[in-house]
Amino acid sequence: MSDSWQPSASREVMQLRARMLTDIRAFFDQHGVLEVETPLLSASCTTDPNLSSFSTQYRQQNLYLNTSPEYCMKRLLAAHGDAIFQICKSFRDDELGPKHNPEFTMLEWYRPGFDMFELMDELAGLVQMLAGNSGLDIKTVQKISYADAYWQAAGINPHVASADECRRCALEHDIEQPVGLEDDADEWLDWLMTQLIMPTFQPDGFTFIYDYPQSQSALAKLYKDRHGTTVAARFELFYGETELANGFDELLDTHEQRQRFERENRNRLALGMRPSVIDEDLLQALQHGLPVCSGVALGLDRLLMVLARADTLEQILAFPFARI
């Protein structure tokens, strides 16, 4: 008889998840951040060519499951201006593997008046508290700029490096040359990140990478770093080589945001993908006025993997994709 009806996660892991969620809510209560809830269904979807939305229909209207609660939360920010957080399910099509499940739990929060460095500090405080409560000994929490990380590990400046320079760097370090990257410098940088940069992170510590190339700005504002280079006010958090969180100093310019959405849709078309439905409500919210703020999305399933010392999502999900 098959045991596929049974949960993958142990009772102990389920208890650890419950404690984690309780501790997160207590943390934000102590910090004066309001818990909110927004719809999982939307009439629009992400334009990011690297993400695919699940679609459905209701009364002949096309709807999409959110890849994150970001857009609706920003509408709340524009309307009320409060510091807010949300714990919810998010969905991404065509993502499945040891660290990917098409349905996953996300914690997202926004801090009016915070820049990304202040938000990094708050995020570090949260994950260190959760790690301590689970008995996990964190050796280090380090912050390093995207440029410094590449220079130290690869000897290249990622803000000016061409695809050819990245390819030569890969050859010099005996890194596999994947098919299909061709002349896209950003794709090469992403490949070098996984193959060369991330292996240098402390295996038992947290690492923040910040100041991403402006071509990878997503929904982050741009600014000049200490060298005068225009960079994206964006950061990511890793535990060892596991990516946990992605955050921004949020873009406030409606015109620039529309241009980015339209550019991403052109990229989708070039890749043979359908263009996405742009969220006009978000753009109207930005036009109304979003407070100066920073926001971050933290993958709670991956964080639970860290807290439970698990190797795969199947070990910490009650019913992963293979068991639904």
Image (tube, rainbow, N blue to C red):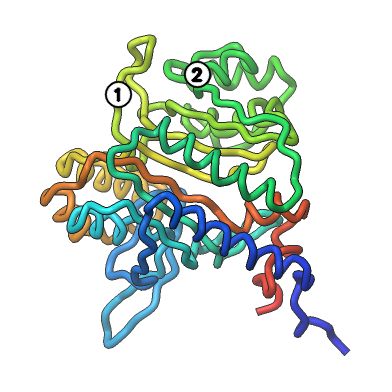
Quadrant of residue 97 in the image? bottom right
The N terminus appears in which quarter of the rendering?
Answer: bottom right
* Frontmost residue, 164 versus 90: 90
Is 250 above or below relative to 91?
A: above
Viewer can see residue 176:
no
Point out the tag, 2 or 1, that comes first from the N-terminus.
2
Q: Is residue 236 left or right of residue 265?
A: right
Q: Measuring 58% from the left and 57% from the top, which residue is drawn there?
A: 300
Residue kind at label 2, given as amino acid type: Ala
Q: How crowded is the residue under tag 2: few (<14 C-alpha within 10 Å), some, or many (20+)?
A: many
Q: Point out residue 103 in the picture as x, y percentages from the top left corner.
A: 55, 67
The residue labelled by disc 1 is 223
The residue labelled by disc 2 is 147
* Frontmost residue, 65 versus 120: 120
Q: Measuring 47% from the left and 43% from the top, which residue is drawn there?
A: 246
Is 48 above or below relative to 237?
A: below
The C terminus appears in which quarter of the rendering?
Answer: bottom right
